[in-house]
Image: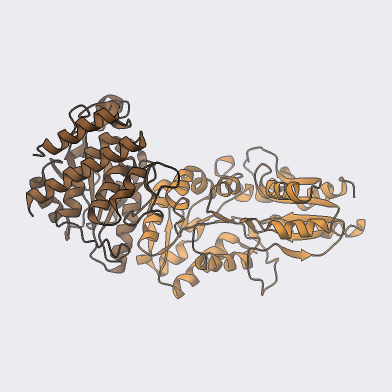
Amino acid sequence: MKATREAYGEALLELGRINNQVVALDADLSKSTKTSLFAKEFPERFFNVGIAEQNLIGIAAGLSLAGFVPYASTFAIFATGRAWEQIRNTVAYPSLNVKICASHAGITVGEDGASHQSIEDIALMSVIPNMTVLVPADPIETKSMVNWAFKHKGPVYIRLGRMGVPDVLPKDYSFDTKPYVIKKGKKIVIFATGIMLWKCLEAIELLKNYNIEPTLVNVSCIKPFPEDLIVKIAKEHDIVFTAEEHNVINGLGSMVASTLSRNYPMKISFIGINDRFGTSGKPNDLLSYYGLDPNSIKERLLSWGV
Amino acid sequence: MDDLHLRERAVNIRESIIKMITAAKSGHPGGSLSGVEILVSLFFGGVMNYDPKNPQLETRDRFFLSKGHAAPLLYSTLAEAGYFDKSGLVTLRQLNSPFQGHPDMRKLPGIEASTGSLGQGLSISVGCALGLRLKGFNSHVFTLLGDGELEEGQIWEAAMAASHFKLDNLTAIVDRNKLQIDGFTEEVMSIEPLNEKWLSFGWNVVELNGHSFEELIPALQRAKGRSDKKPLVIIAHTIKGRGVSFMENVCDFHGKAPSEEQAKVAYSEIRECDVH
């Protein structure tokens, strides 16, 4: 078990060893976002800007203009909330080569509660033109994404979590923006993103005795959204579910709905945060409280015309 | 530097500013006219190292227009410097024109960042100055800030960072024309005491007449090649709408275009204007 933020910290350090154009920035949360690993080995290429997220993004933009590839990190709510307009105008509008890798996304932040639990960052980043929005499912995918983002020219947002996640994707998995079918089933398809891939896998285990075998798809590239493949996979099924640790408004579910409504209208059931703020609690308790734990997912699948 | 030559540049740039804003029937003349001598000094006063034929030269000095609404000033100056032809300037703010209402770095050479949303240029400059220093270049970063813009909190985040990172390759210039859209800065939201604010943030401060080449050029030349481990701010006292009598210190001309008749008067006044 390893949090995607930890995998990020390790991947960034490895990337920094290979490429001296890589610089990292943080806003006084380097120990939490794990940019501290990079900072320790490359202090001259690490910039802690203090508790100043707007400045974080602006300085990252300036470093990219000087020819570096900046990875800027803080908590997701502060990166995408506090500094949204800096990301829009200074980074995304001229399509600067800035990577925003924000941790502590979703409710599994845990005890810190609603002020620190970002349930709207996918929406906030997806609505900005030129932006690429990625949500890794596990440590394996996180590492692959960090490297993919380096090769991709332009702004990238990577959504990272605090809670430990097991490796759910194959060891040789390589991120390429395409949806990845992790379990091939029939009738039902679940499009899941982030840690919900793991939770859906657990839910599918619970469904074994019910003779239900859903297809489970990892959708880690929210933008540009892989529309053709989503439609193709949906067509092979009767029922569509989406699962995300994010507000059901304007996250993965909305992207799937928008795509299918234009290409192949189907009924969709959305698993996510139902337009509510988070709250304090242990991560696993919160997943149950918001209906995102394996058992709740199982019940949702059972209750919807299977 | 030949003073007559500089004055001619300033006249040309002021004419271009009026011409393009009049043609667009919208734009920001006041804050464009107040910054003319500052940009002429940077680009033609032997201060900045740049090459219009090689606008991406890595070791060039950088100029960031943080007060992006003064786009006509930047466009006119870059055209005067030879980055592009002056003939396109009159397409300002029109559909498909590279001369966007606020600068778009992807549409024209010589524009170092897309600005317009106030308060962000100093952070960009800090990042760029850090990057240039990390590369081992002696390049200098100059940034023009509006005085009203200093009301943005992000400016002070960046000011704190510039001094923390000991950026002596960064010089900010405040176009202190004392007006913002809704009135005098000191009435809308007072920014004084400005000198003391920057000093307390760890910057060196120089105050001067922002329309005097005699004061601007030596100060800007001295700003380069410092090794005092501190960023420098030049508070340039200017007159909003400088060079056109009916625009000078008139708040309304922050973001209003002159009529064709007013433009004619403006051209003749600009030719007669004594910039000292």
Q: Residue A124 at what x, y percent from top left?
A: 56, 45
Quick one: A19 or B18, which is closer to the camera?
Answer: B18
Image-based side of A209 in relation to B260, left or right: right
Q: Which colour represents chain A?
A: orange
Give percent across and percent down for residue B205.
17, 45
Q: Is residue B240 visible?
A: no
* Residue B274 appearing in the image: yes
Q: Which chain is brown?
A: B
Q: Residue at x 53, y 50 (%)?
A: A129
Colouring of the image:
by chain
Left or right position of A86 against B158: right
Q: Which quadrant is home to the N terminus of chain A?
A: bottom right
Q: Position of residue A131 (x, y in %)?
A: 53, 53
Nearest the eye: B130 or B35: B35
Q: Residue at x 22, y 32 (%)?
A: B264
Residue B256, x across and y down, in percent: 32, 30
Q: Residue at x 33, y 40 (%)?
A: B69
Would residue B93 be found to the left or right of residue B223 on screen?
A: right
The correct choice, above or below, for B203 with respect to B177 in the image is below
Which sits in the foreground, B261 or A199?
B261
Q: Count up the numbered dots.
A: 0
Location of residue B196 (image quadrant): top left
**Which of the pair B177/A30 is nearer the observer?**
B177
